[in-house]
Amino acid sequence: MTGMAEIEQLRTAIPFGDGEMSEELLKQLDATAPSIWIASIASALKITFSLFLIHAGMALLKRVPKARKSLLIWSVLYILLTVCSAVINWVPRMDLVQQSSEVQAMFLAQIVISMPLYLILPIFLLIYLNKNQARNEVALWR
């Protein structure tokens, strides 16, 4: 929960200039950051979602009929959490995105690279678990 924030990860991933962002830009990013309690809640929710995914995955392996519905609900809620986290993180910083090419690169990296990686599993589960074959298989369990 107290690990490196996503914005810090993006900062280290974007090679600009000397590889370091200016102190002024770092201060602007920190000044426009959402409150620490919002970031803590988002981190706690992501950990909770991860633990629930482990539980639902084990239920799926045990062929528990409710596992399919649990994974579908998890997928929808995780997509909403991911999108809301990005919105909360970037809406206050949109002026910086328009002013600085470095911040714009961080924004684009999150939207084009990071977000799709976060969303691969839930979208796959939504598609696969709604196929007739998967629904029919689950109907045969217990």
Image (cartoon, grey):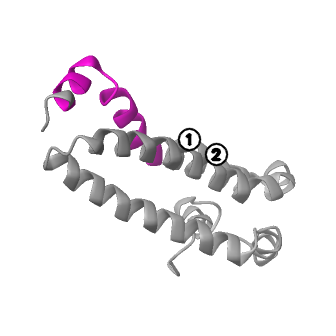
Residue 108 - label: 2
Left or right, 89 with respect to 18, comes to: right
Task: Check the image and report above or below for 9 versus 1.
Answer: above
Task: Check the image and report above or below for 137 versus 49.
Answer: above
Which residue is more in the foreground, 79 or 93?
79
Q: Is residue 20 visible?
A: no
- What kind of element bears circle 1? helix
- What kind of element bears circle 2? helix
Left or right, 2 with respect to 50, comes to: right
- What amino acid is found at the position of numbered circle 2 in the picture? Leu
The residue wearing badge 1 is 112
Residue at the spot 43% in from the left edge and 60% down from the top edge: 49
* 2 and 1 marks in contact (CB < 8 Å): yes
Q: Is residue 25 visible?
A: yes
Residue at the spot 21% in from the left edge and 20% down from the top edge: 133
Mark pair 2, 1: CA separation: 6 Å
Tell me which corner region of the image, top left, top right, bottom left or bottom right, holds residue 100: bottom right
Q: Where's the C terminus, which quadrant? A: top left
Q: Position of residue 10 (x, y in %)?
A: 57, 61
- What amino acid is found at the position of numbered circle 1 in the picture? Val
Neighbourhood count class around disc 2 (C-alpha, 10 Å): few under 14, some 14–19, many 20 upward: some
Left or right, 118 with respect to 133, comes to: right
Q: Position of residue 136 (x, y in %)?
A: 20, 22
Q: Position of residue 140 (x, y in %)?
A: 14, 29
| Residue with the most extreme bottom position | 2
Residue at the spot 76% in from the left edge and 69% down from the top edge: 33
Q: Position of residue 13 (x, y in %)?
A: 52, 61
Residue bounds of the magenta highlight: 118-138
Residue at the spot 60% in from the left edge and 44% down from the top edge: 111
Is residue 125 found inside the magenta-colored segment of the image? yes
